[in-house]
Image: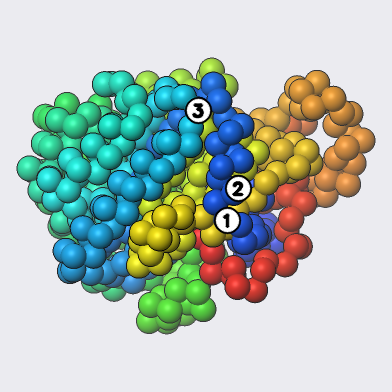
Amino acid sequence: MTQTLLPAALLERYGKLPLPRYTSYPPANLWGDRDESLLRRALSEIEGRPLSLYVHVPFCRKLCLYCGCNMLVTRSQDLVTRYLNALDAEVAHVAALLPHRPEVVQVHLGGGTPTYLDEAQLSRLWQSLASRFDIPRGIEASIEIHPPVTSGAQLARLAELGFSRVSMGVQDFDELVQKRISRIQPFAQTRDLVVLSRQLGFVSVNIDLMYGLPLQTVERFAVTLDRVAELRPDRVALFGYAHMPTLRKHQSVFRSEELPSVEVRAALFELAMTRLLGLGYVYVGLDHFALPDDELLLARRQGELRRNFMGYTTCKSSAVLAFGPSSISELGSHYVQNEREVAAYCDRIESGTLPVVRGCSLGRDDLIRREVIMQLLCNLVLSKHEVSIRHGLDFDTYFASELTLLAPLIADGLCAWEDDILRILPPGQLLLRTVAAVFDATLHRPAPRHHAAAV
């Protein structure tokens, strides 16, 4: 067994805790039922803020057995056309509610598999946005792609439209793992798309990896990392597989003995971290690595790094306006989520209403805690003084119980105080959510029963 940075006792103590990924605070499973009045209210409060636009494309050609995303396997072009019609109507409806045409600073297409759409459909989707929002050429426009269903013609069209960043799902190049998770993806296929993306002028290529998948071993994952080194993407996202067979029925095909133990999961993550750092990547936090000149690291230096449902992003001050099934808008102190199912989403749009079904409005305590948690996740440091000044409070008094909970983590070497700065130490970077969770006041709040499977 490869020696990990974390002793077995710490792995046993912290490694099995079920903690949120903190792409929002409060976590999405705690939100309540809401309707379009929440979106209308939120839109009225963001005047003057730039926008990041997100579009969820839910379609996939086949089911990958590890998947936890909101997706739909279909071959019905009628359904895809209905979705595109509904999406266009949603964008038009929401844009009409804005009192002005705000500056757009980011566009992101996620899924599902956005390149399920052909060139004409991708153009139509883009036109839905560009005809209602001012989208300057050269902004960060990114898209997630699945190499086995992505053609050179699609990449060329995306480049013509103005996309500048592409994120390629890989998970693992090992053929044994690929077969078990039902995701066959030859290395050469991915390599060729990486080369073509750079030839077409994409300024950034991201590779997504996943550890904790069935049949993964440290030795075989090392080979995958060798292949990543050959590709040398600009960013690497390293996600931990979340095994939730009660919520994702298709995951029940994996037997418990096929899944890496807590110790092996930690070894897989440490192996990836050690290798990527050795290749010159910088650890951004939690699940992202980037080359030193990447915009994520520039954003961190400027205090603009942000974590949300798109992972780590730049443009901390922008409001996120999201479209499509299950998409989540982050508008100031409000989160707003759309209807999850494609048909129900289309039904709502076609009836003339916006498809909002869930959401959350944050109070003062939520906003303070969100800032503290995101500071730790984005910067790996937290200044008591800055939080106190910004929110008009005494940090030690406000977070007295949290400081008590933090003490054993400090004793275990996960973090340390340097004057008034809380700094995450290397072992704590492997358990970053554990440190952040100290400041989470919702951990023991029960989720609404009918929202147990929320994203």
Picture quarter containing residue 179? bottom left
Residue under numbered circle 3: 99
- SS under mark 3: loop
Q: Are dots 1 and 3 in contact, CB under 8 Å?
A: no
**Residue 252 or residue 452, whichever sits in front:** 452
Vertical placement of 352 versus 64: above or below? Answer: above
**Residue 299 or residue 221, whichever sits in front:** 299
Residue at image point 34% right, 24% down: 134
- The percent position of residue 113, horizontal first and vertical second, equals 27, 55
Q: Is residue 148 left or right of residue 443?
A: left
> Residues under labels 1 and 3: Cα distance?
20 Å
Q: Is residue 45 left or right of residue 101?
A: right
Q: Is residue 11 left or right of residue 115?
A: right
Residue under numbered circle 2: 38
* Label ID, residue 35: 1
- SS under mark 2: helix
- The percent position of residue 63, horizontal first and vertical second, equals 28, 70
> Residues under labels 1 and 2: Cα distance?
6 Å
Residue at image point 20% right, 43% down: 124
Q: Amino acid at mark 1?
A: Asp
Q: Which is nearer the N-term, disc 1 or disc 3?
A: 1
Q: Are dots 1 and 2 in contact, CB under 8 Å?
A: yes
Q: Is residue 35 left or right of residue 228?
A: right
> Residues under labels 2 and 3: Cα distance?
16 Å
Q: Is residue 350 visible?
A: yes
Residue at image point 32% right, 25% down: 135
Q: Mark 1 Cα within 10 Å, few/some/many (few <14, many 20+)? A: some
Please give the count of numbered marks on the rendered protein: 3
Picture quarter containing residue 436? top right
Observer-side mark, 2 or 3, equals 3
Q: Mark 3 Cα within 10 Å, few/some/many (few <14, many 20+)? A: few
Q: Which is nearer the N-term, disc 2 or disc 3?
A: 2
